[in-house]
Image: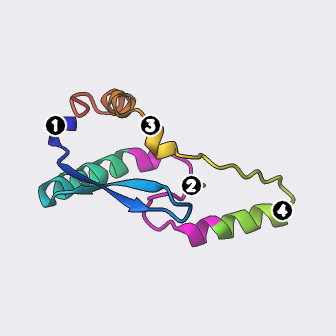
Amino acid sequence: MQHLLDLKRTYIPKSNGKMRPLGVPSKDTRYMLTGITLFLSKLLNPRIGNYQHGFRENKSCATALLDLYDEIRAGKEVYEFDLKSFFNTVSYKEVCKSIEILVPGLGN
């Protein structure tokens, strides 16, 4: 899939003085990524728990906070952690391997 991703790489300043890399997709790449997102959402949404809120239809930061509030009120323990630079370190090849397992032929 890498050859299909036409991204313009640019850098934007962060508040700490460092620069954040930003990939700006072309219009064609954006259409392709939207199609893949819709396809994978339909495939994966039934497989993942209702407690996951990131990038899901009818889910948001607000629904995550409401669920968190309910958990705290129920007396459950809550843990916070930060995945620093997580998306900067995700292996593109590993993502494609995972997609290939779910949808043979798509990860090539």
Circle on res. 74: 4
Residue at the spot 38% in from the left edge and 30% down from the top edge = 98
Position of 82 with respect to 7 (left or right) is right
Give the CA separation, mark 4 to mark 3. Answer: 35 Å
Report whether 71 appears left or right of 98.
Answer: right
Query: Which residues, given as a range, are shown in magenta?
Result: 44-64
* Dot 1 amino acid type: His
Judging by the rendered image, the residue that carries numbered circle 2 is 50
Furthest residue to the left? Answer: 28
Mark drawn on residue 90: 3
* Camera-nearest label, 4 or 3: 3
Rendered position, 41 above or below 92: below
Distance between mark 1 and mark 4 Cα atoms: 49 Å
Across and down, in percent, residue 96 comes to 32, 32
98 inside magenta stretch: no
- Nearer to us of marks 1 and 4 is 1
Dividing the picture into quadrants, the one containing residue 4 is: top left
Give residue 18's position: percent from left, percent from top.
49, 55
Instruction: Give residue 68's quadrant in the image.
Output: bottom right
- Which amino acid does the dot numbered 2 rest on? Asn
